[in-house]
Amino acid sequence: MEQLRALTIASFKMYFRNKSAVFFSLFIPILIIIIFGVLLGGNGSKLSIGINDQANNQSSQNIISQLKKIDSFTISSGVYDNEIKSLKSGDRDIVLVFPKGFSLTPVDTSSPSKIQAYYDQAKSQTAQVGLLVLDNIVQTINQGIYSNISKQSVPQYVSLEQKGIETNNLSGIDFLVPGIIAMSIMQLGLFSVAFAFTTMKKTGALKRLQATPAKPSNFIIAQSLSRLGISMIQVLILIGIGIALFKLHMYGNIIFFFFFILLGAAVFLAMGFAVAGYSKDENQAAPITNFIQLPMLFLSGVFFPRTLMPDFLKNVTSILPLTYLADALRQIANNGAGISQLWGDFIGLLIWAIICMIIAVKVFKWE
């Protein structure tokens, strides 16, 4: 145990003496959060409008086509539950629902057709801009239907029913930070292990280690423990910056949050050991690590929602380890999800951890 403790401390010192490793694994994620936090500090010039068209007829389609022509709106369509969920998670500013039977045909002016507009109560000022525009559209529609009636006596055949709902009051930074944390864990596991161990193999340090009283297994465990500790430091720094500078929300259980961080770190540490075991030197390790991490970096929902991807791409990227990790961290932080709601992410990461550990054991060489 004393030997393991000494090796772990030495591993920490080796890591922090490597200025490039500290720069890329600690400074870069912090810089990304600060840059995106400043960029996302405002709500932006466009409002995200979600539409659930239950009527699906000519009347509803005519109004939707008008909405799509408004430059200040970004229009998305989906089923009711998904759109309301997107509103609660901060991905929508307003959700419009066209109920079944909605019609612009004036049959009974005493019972107007209603367009239901849901908005976040916590962001009512932002939503009011869009609601005013929508209300003007409705009034224009009413005046067009009753063009032969004076403006003062236009019946309200079509009405906009506004409903504020309670949400988690999320912002862009709330979406971004869990993804950046997942990214930093991936890069620490892949790059720090792959490059450190290939360097030690090339210089013969690993081979000489076998001639010392230190057990090789203790050395590997010490390296893993030190990087898990560094991961914890990273996460605490990133969360602290998010809360202090950008009012990051953390709704979920912090224990579950760190549980998935440890599981994700185990996956990427094993992946890093596999790359280090296969690679002869840094020149061989670099393209392999980039080949592994770049697709995940851009396709696992780190910087933008995967819902924006085509369906075939979403299906392919849904099985990537970084997708499981980013999704779990985001669900816990943003929606307060418990472990029972994250079985898919847990099993996905566990399978990846087992696969990567088996590969690492098979290919790892000491020289």
Image (cartoon, rainbow, N blue to C red):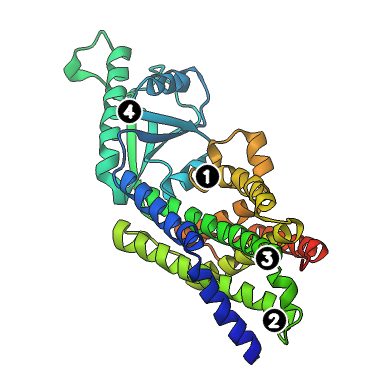
Q: Which residue is mark 3?
A: 203
* Residue 129, numbered circle: none
User: Which of the marked residues, 3 or 1, is nearer the chain's N terminus?
Assistant: 1
- Element type at mark 4: loop
Q: Image height check: is 26 above or below 109? A: below
* Residue 72, numbered circle: 4
Locate residue 281, reporting x and y percent: 69, 56
Q: Which residue is mark 2?
A: 218
Residue furthest right in the image: 362
- Element type at mark 3: helix
Estimate how packed mark 3 is, as few (under 14), some (14 to 19) or many (20 or more) residues with alpha carbons within 10 Å: few
Which is in the foreground here, disc 2 or disc 1? 2
Q: Residue at (37%, 47%) from the top-left corner?
A: 36
Structural distance between the alpha carbons of marks 2 and 3:
20 Å
For the C terminus, the image quarter is: bottom right
Q: Image height check: is 129 above or below 65? A: below
Structural distance between the alpha carbons of marks 3 and 1:
58 Å
Answer yes or no: do the residues labelled 2 and 3 have beta carbons within 8 Å?
Answer: no
